[in-house]
């Protein structure tokens, strides 16, 4: 194969383009999309982890991967047994909160 372009120049141009794309991102909208898409609440610490140029529907696109910090919780009963999410409707959580308030008041 005959090389017709300088690899380093092409790599630098690609990296500069991806940096410009990352700089143009509306992070507030990205956060909202990610929260809606993954049904999660994402903290303000949203960072671009990786980016690459892709082809989507025969057009150039960009794949931007984000690293996020998020809070997750696990429910346990009074004996330390895990309570799966499908067994914890919102009403039960509210009821547990009310019971916890009553216990605290009695202390």
Image (cartoon, grey):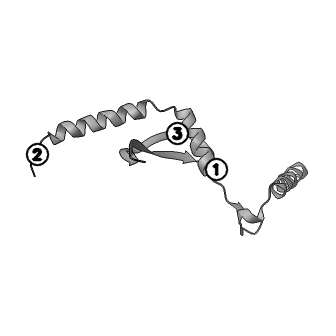
Disc 2 crowd, CA 10 A, few/some/many (<14, 14-19, 20+): few
Residue that carries the numbered disc 2 in the rendered image: 3
Mark in the foreground, 1 or 2: 2
Could you give the CA–CA distance between mark 1 and mark 2, rounded to whole angstroms?
A: 48 Å
Residue that carries the numbered disc 1 in the rendered image: 39
Who is closer to the viewer here, 75 or 64?
Answer: 64
Q: Secondary structure at mark 3?
A: strand
Residue 76 falls in image quadrant: bottom right
Q: Secondary structure at mark 1?
A: loop
Disc 3 crowd, CA 10 A, few/some/many (<14, 14-19, 20+): few
Tell me if I can see residue 77 in this picture. Answer: no
Q: Is 43 situated left or right of 22 in this image?
A: right
Q: Position of residue 61 (x, y in %)?
A: 40, 42
Q: Position of residue 80 (x, y in %)?
A: 71, 67
**Residue sitting at 57 percent across and 39 percent down?**
31
- Say the numbered circle drawn on residue 77: none
Residue 90 falls in image quadrant: bottom right
Q: State how many labels appear.
A: 3
Q: Is 70 situated left or right of 8 in this image?
A: right
Instruction: Decide which of tag 1 and tag 3 comes sooner along the chain.
Output: 1
Could you give the CA–CA distance between mark 1 and mark 3, rounded to whole angstroms?
A: 17 Å
Residue that carries the numbered disc 3 in the rendered image: 45
Are the two marked residues, 2 and 3, in contact with CB atoms closer than 8 angstroms?
Answer: no
Q: Is 38 situated left or right of 82 in this image?
A: left
Q: Position of residue 93 (x, y in %)?
A: 80, 55
Instruction: Decide which of tag 1 and tag 2 comes sooner along the chain.
Output: 2
Who is closer to the viewer here, 1 or 37?
Answer: 1
Mark in the foreground, 1 or 3: 1
Q: Secondary structure at mark 2?
A: loop
Q: Is 71 situated left or right of 88 in this image?
A: left
Disc 1 crowd, CA 10 A, few/some/many (<14, 14-19, 20+): few
Residue 63 falls in image quadrant: top left
């Amino acid at each position: 194969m005959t090389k017709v372009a300088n690899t380093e120049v092409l790599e630098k141009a690609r990296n500069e383009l991806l940096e410009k794309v990352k700089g143009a991102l509306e992070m507030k909208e990205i956060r909202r999309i990610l929260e809606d898409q993954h049904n999660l609440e994402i903290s303000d610490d949203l960072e671009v982890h990786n980016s690459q140029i892709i082809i989507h529907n025969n057009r150039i696109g960009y794949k931007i991967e984000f690293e996020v910090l998020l809070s997750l919780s696990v429910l346990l009963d009074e004996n330390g047994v895990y309570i799966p999410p499908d067994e914890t409707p919102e009403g039960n959580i509210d009821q547990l909160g009310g019971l916890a308030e009553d216990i605290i008041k009695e202390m």
